[in-house]
Amino acid sequence: MTNRYTQSPAAQAPAMARLARAALPKWHIDDAEVTLLKLRENAVFRIDVPAGASFVMRIHRHNYHSDGELLAELQWLQALAAAGIEAPDIVPAASGRLFEVVRADAAAEGRQVDLLAWMNGRPMGAFWETSSDDPATLTGNLRLLGRLAARVHNQAVAWRRPAGFTRHEWDADGIVGEVPFWGRFWELDTLSPGQRRLLERARTRVHAELVTLGKSPSTYSMIHADLVPENILVDGDSIRLIDFDDAGFGWHHFEIATALISHLGRPDFDRVRDALIAGYREHRSFPDSAIERLPLFFLARSFTYLSWVHTRFETELAQQLTPSFVETSCSLADAYLSE
């Protein structure tokens, strides 16, 4: 069987579109316009029903999440919505299930498919890019994002999870253990011997430091885990989160670091960071000691991006991003080890 993940997005798109159309009857949708929005981990389509509503359909990467893990993600989305947090609303299938496994010529192995209500707004930026907004608009939006992130964490800490709830962990082992969630980043082929030694030294120290933090419910819970600019929709004075595909258990510091890492190197970084933290503190504590730990989590987050490109190196996007990811990780590792 051809590995579709080694194909270019242009080559994959028609097959994924056929699968999207094959899935529509599961939601009693007979006719709709199907438009590809994104093709990376998942194939994501906009579904426009004539004279009706619009939706987002996600066709999930095969074997990325088990059925139980995907169910847990969708259960958390429902709980966030019930708490008044602006996250995607799930549209159950006609069967009442939150997702369906659909088979078609495009995916003989069967693919998990879910449907979400359309959310208005414009992304703050593209993958691994900062917003192009002027500084005042950017800091204003990051303050709103800080408020929303704190509300998400408040809900997660207080939430009584359903029986059987299972999701991956962004903990010491999941980030820098022997088998990280996204892969053994220190084995990335493009690393020079010196870069590899640097990252392995930093990895050892990061693992030890993360272990000492523990997993107190006050600082470790379900997190979105992917607050990059393209997953943040701005709609007037509202900020909305999309793409909970990487959501799992993790430190709140990791969430904050993810929201800020693409802004590193800006001359006004301190202002950007302080805006996010100020918004967060309106709803939840984030002490100065947590801010002092952010360099640790910037490095940990950068390691996960190296893991991502390492295990997806056959894709065009990974090949494009690898040089900048390596440069960022090595720079952060060198600074971290020099402290």
Image: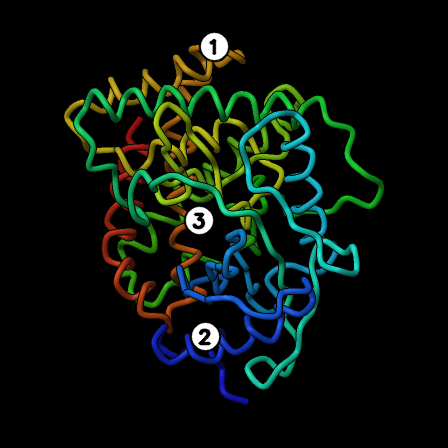
Residue type at the position of mark 1:
Glu
Label 1 neighbourhood size at 10 Å, few (<14), some (14-19), many (20+)?
A: some
Which residue was labeled with disc 3?
304
Circles 2 and 3, Cβ within 8 Å, touching? The answer is no
The quarter of the image holding the C terminus is top left
Determine which quarter of the picture holds residue 295.
Answer: top left
Residue placed most toward the observer, 328 or 195: 328
User: Nearer the observer, disc 2 or disc 3?
Assistant: 2
Q: Is residue 83 left or right of residue 47?
A: right
How far apart are labels 3 and 1 at the CA level? 29 Å
Residue type at the position of mark 3:
Thr
Q: Position of residue 224 (x, y in %)?
A: 53, 38
Is 63 rendered above or below residue 330? below
User: Nearer the observer, disc 3 or disc 1?
Assistant: 1
Q: Is residue 84 left or right of residue 166?
A: left
User: Nearer the observer, disc 1 or disc 2?
Assistant: 1
Secondary structure of the residue carrying numbered label 3:
helix
Q: Is residue 233 left or right of residue 128?
A: right
Q: Position of residue 141 (x, y in %)?
A: 33, 25
Residue placed most toward the observer, 196 or 182: 182
Which residue was labeled with disc 1?
282
Residue placed most toward the observer, 106 or 63: 106
- Residue drawn where x is 67% and y is 24% of the image: 157
Of the image marks 3 and 1, the number of the one nearer the N terminus: 1
Residue type at the position of mark 2:
Tyr
What coloring was used for the rendering? Answer: rainbow
Q: Mark on residue 5?
A: 2
Secondary structure of the residue carrying numbered label 1:
loop
Q: Is residue 146 visible?
A: yes
Q: How many labels were placed on the picture?
A: 3
Determine which quarter of the picture holds residue 212.
Answer: top right
The quarter of the image holding the N terminus is bottom right
